[in-house]
Image (spheres, rainbow, N blue to C red):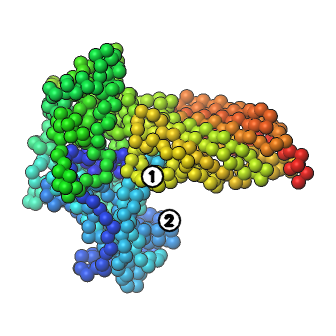
Amino acid sequence: MTDTHSLRRIYSSRWLYRTLGTILLALAAITLAPRTDADDWLPVSPEDLKMTSDPKAPGAPAIFLYREVDRTDARYGGNERNYVRVKILTEAGREYANIEIPYQDHMNISSIHARTIHPDGSIVNFDGQVFKTAVQKKRDSKYQVKSFTVPDVQIGSIIEYRYTYDFDNFLVFNSQWILSAPLFTKKALFTLVPDKNLAVQWNWPAGLPEGAPKPIQDPIDSKVHMTAENIPAFQEEEYMPPENELKFRVNFVYAQENFESDQNKYWKNFGKKKFGEAEAFAKRKSLSDAVASIVSPSDTPEVKLRKIYDRCQEIRNLSYEHAISTQEVKHDKMKLPENAEEVLKLGYGYGAQITWVFLGLAQAAGLDARPALVASRSSHFFNPVRMDSHELESNLVLVKLDGKDGYYDPGAAFTPFGQLPWFETNVSGRLLDKDGGTWFETPLPPSDMSRVSRSAKFKLNDDGSLEGTVALTYTGMEAQFFRLQERNADDAARKLAAEERLKNSIPAAAEIELKNAPDWKGSKTPLVAEFEVKIPGWMTNAGKRAMLPTGFFCGNEKHLFEHATRTYPVYYTFPFSVADDIRITLPDGWKVESFPKAINQDIKAAAYTFSADGAPGALHLQRTMRADIFLVPADKYPILRAFYQFLRTSDDQQVVLSPGAAMAGK
């Protein structure tokens, strides 16, 4: 279970797990007054006002003229002040007037101010409202933002805005400067005042922009600073590795003591310390009594482990709830548990604690269970050379059954027994012991462990429309991922999310309504959503015949990997499979004149099959697709792209129908 000490998280599951003991402040929408402290704005040069393009960013809709990040890390009053100035160069660039400021639960946003400067120097101050919204940036990225629109922005205008992140007290985590941005940056200034009580060092895993000097620390005030110019725009690609793995960035790493220069010694010392902490938390005499109430002496080791896992997932998991404010904690007199015994007694804990409770119970049951820490791959890839212990941010338990190692993390909500959340798979980990531990790798599950199954029963009407029912079944990581995204949503929002998922998979306008109440909170069973569906105009007439497309649920792949070239590797969060079973009842008197050809395309890492058959008055279509893909190098991209082009062509096949006598007469 993730134990977050870093801001290197950008999406729903990436920001779920909070630092133990962090008290979270609620955020609300705010209305801003016009600026009165105009002196805080930097002067604007005549050249910037007159600019119409930049030769170093040809064709850019807009550029960052200036960016500034001034960060202070401290146990009390930590904050980060941001200043942004954007030049609008084209009509498309006007969209940058819509500002989104992402945030996490352990921070507040204050001092938001903005204005528009026209080429003639006239100024329009922003005095509108700032909204709190959730954004679904990608399939695996859902996060909170404060959003607003800067007024009266035209081609040639300059937009500038300022805001401050205020961090919770007692929360000192690894900091970072993100140098890359969606637009070309003409000049950027970054500063950091490190926490004075901790040692700090820094690194830049993806390198620095060409010509940029390395960060330096002022020997007098200890402030670290750097200036970079002409930073190229960061180009996003579909299914690319985590952005933090690719962007120019500077990471700051804190330590209680001086940094160790020997890598092996560093990780040995770290492993000894974390083993002691895990054992101290998990080993409690009272757990033997707790185990007796969970398992039976006659249970097999696997049955015992499963019962203990299920019991741990019943514990209230604070890591997956809305932010808990200081006032709520005082009002409810909540005690933060300090060991496994207290977690069981109180009935709640953070995800990391719940996983160590599982460790203690498994050991008390006589099972061979050991603590481990692994590196999440949700926002970056682990590199032990950096000697950044915070990168081993997730804890799990290794249990040996019948001589085989199994990995378990019941503190990761909605994760089925025997599986891990996707970001803990295929990653490096440290198996902890009193001597400091050893390295290991978690397995990558095959595609058949995470499946979306769509079962449709349609009736074809004379007017060419389809209507009927569709049952969607999500298993494995697909179910866990969906439940995770909607864990704190209300019934209406969940209903909308389920309907949108199905709607996006149908490459035509469709009327969709969720009819059942899916199990959003469990992990033992698949997530099943049942819909009533109507698709107008699905069939088309072709003289005396009718054409029925067979690509019912191919919407998500219609435009995937269309670009001929690729800069970054293709990165799938986890292997997956899709299975579609479609049955269609034809109108009276209608017949199938011809079926499309069957397909079985297998390129080892991915495969696609399709078949069509039928009985009198009925059609039966089956389609499967699997992707046992994790990371495809950019030079292998043409192979993957060709597969998806073949898939799209195959999905365009059609069934040829002969209408009944009545329709033929019409």
Q: Nearer the viewer, residue 555 or 89?
A: 555
Q: Nearer the viewer, residue 193 or 420?
A: 420
Is residue 105 rendered to the left or right of residue 278?
A: right
Mark 2: give few (<14), some (14-19) or many (20+) Cα within 10 Å: few
- Which mark, by number, is residue 59? 2
Looking at the rendered image, the quarter that the N terminus falls into is top left
Mark 1: give few (<14), some (14-19) or many (20+) Cα within 10 Å: few
Closer to the N terminus: mark 1 or mark 2?
A: 2
Is residue 629 rendered to the left or right of residue 350?
A: right
Q: Quadrant of residue 295?
A: top left
Q: Quadrant of residue 343?
A: top left
Residue at 37%, 67% (x, y): give it: 131
Q: CA distance from mark 1 to mark 2?
A: 45 Å
Q: Is residue 465 above or below residue 72?
A: above
- Which mark, by number, is residue 122? none
Residue 397 shows in the view: yes
Can you give x and y, in whole percent of width and height, for residue 136 in the image?
44, 54
Can you give x and y, in whole percent of width and height, for residue 485 in the image?
41, 47
Which amino acid type corresponds to the residue marked 2 in the rendered image? Gly
Q: Say if mark 1 contacts mark 2, CB within 8 Å.
A: no
Can you give x and y, in whole percent of width and height, for residue 458 in the image?
68, 43
Which amino acid type corresponds to the residue marked 1 in the rendered image? Asp
* Furthest-right residue in this view: 665
- Which label lies toward us, 1 or 2? 1
Looking at the rendered image, the quarter that the C terminus falls into is bottom right
Can you give x and y, in whole percent of width and height, for residue 470 in the image?
61, 43
Residue at 36%, 43% (x, y): give it: 378
Residue at 51%, 35% (x, y): give it: 451
Residue 168 shows in the view: no
Residue at 16%, 48% (x, y): give it: 200
